[in-house]
Image: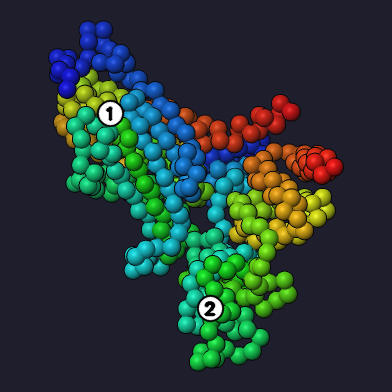
Amino acid sequence: MNEKPEKLIDKKGLRLDGRKPDELRPVKLEVGVIPNADGSAYVEQGKNKILVGVYGPREVHPKHLALQDRTVLKCRYHMAPFSVQERKSPAPSRREIELSKVIRESLEPAIFMEYYPRTMIDVFIEVLQADGGTRCASITAAALALADAGIPMRDLVVACATGKADDTIVLDLMDEEDKLGTADVPVAMMPNLNAISLLQMDGKLTHEEFEKAVNLAVEGCKKIYAVQKEALKAKYVGIKEEEAEE
Amino acid sequence: MPTFFEPKQIVTPGDLLAEGEYIAGENTYVEDKKVYAARLGLVEYDNKRVSVVALKSFYVPRAGDIVIGTVVEVGFNSWTVDINAPYKAFLRPSDVLSRPFKPQKDELSQVLNAGDLIVAKIVSYDRSHDPQLTVAEPGLGKITRGQIVKVTPTKVPRIIGRKGSMISMIKEQTGCQIILGLNGIVLITGKTLEDEQLALTAINRIENESHTSGLTDRITQMLKEEKSKQEEQKE
């Protein structure tokens, strides 16, 4: 493993990877990467690489889990054994089960759950490489995959984390900042509806710091949202341009 | 009462389409007198009606629809049919046999077996009941030959074309019989394999380029070119 860095922010106010405190890591999003799935998306955010597949709405198995008035959303967040420096056991850990729940709950408000009763939507999230903020990147990609599957939604869900590193509020934590920093605030939101669907915090922040962190996260979310929309359209815009050339 | 997009522009879920006294059409929803998109698609403004033509969707059963399905299970007194929808459909023997069904005498698997493809009509469906099928009408029943293609259900109207212009053109050019299941499954039966293949490529091309304009002309041209190529090869 690398040596622990002494400081997370240098004299110039730049972070370990040269970003400013309010700067995002480069985000790359792509939809329709798994033809077998009904909907799919792939995200790269910094060194994070995450693949999401969506199936459904389809019949519920086991049958007794079906709800008579709404669809059942199932999420599975999973980290590949090779996604981190030290091999991660492929069995679902406590953390993965919790993240699956958290991601499911942040996506639920965006979906019209009552449209298709007695069905189930499966969301499979596979983290291929992890570098901090995987839950946020997973939510962003999962929302895209759901939209790609043609599931009616109120809005896309975008997520972004802020945190505190060396007494500074920073946007989009990477692994070192997540581990060595003093606070982590993941925020998921639906920007068009201006609604927050996930808000967590661990570590210590004052009231003012917390407010600043949330506002910064919202700004970050809006930036990613623009990328997300472009990615969704890109699948079809390509064909349109081809036609124009003819 | 403004609208926020050009007609036929691509919108994503959550996009604000119109504000004020508008009627929410397909794939949209209203909140506080504002109409938002609920699916990825192309906007359409028709008078006061705002709708989105989805680029990708799944089939939701509706009574009266003609669909193509696969028999997946033979039960004691019904068949279970996969109709490419979130729900499994059921088919009763009394709708298949022309005489009364006698459980002691009739073996259902001899009439329709698992894996058989059928053209059927949806008789009933609602939120709390799975769709019910029938084949007791002319043109419905077991499929014995031809080829099957799957397309996105929302693109079936595009394959039909305006007043059936596209589909009748393909039928005419290829000499194939085509049955369009509204659930996005298409059956092509032609005299030769080449004819079927030609119709197949045409349909696949429509699916990929469904949101572009002037498609019928381009497909006609493509079919004519392909046909002349085939004839050259024969010579």
Q: Is residue A195 above or below residue A238?
A: below
Q: Amino acid at mark 2?
A: Ser
The residue at the far top in this view is: A12
The residue where tag 2 is placed is B109
Say if residue B175 shows up in the picture. yes
Foreground: A74 or B25? A74
Residue depicted at x 70% and y 31%: A243
Residue depicted at x 32% and y 16%: A19
Which percent across, then down, holds residue A236? 59, 36
Residue depicted at x 35% and y 32%: A49
Which percent across, then down, holds residue A193? 45, 41
Report the Cα–Cα distance between label 2 and label 1: 55 Å
Residue depicted at x 52% and y 48%: A150
Q: Is residue B149 above or below residue B102?
A: above
Foreground: A81 or A21? A81
The residue at the far right in this view is: B235
Which percent across, then down, holds residue A153? 48, 48
Query: What chain does mark 2 sit on?
Result: B
Residue A118 placement: quadrant: bottom left
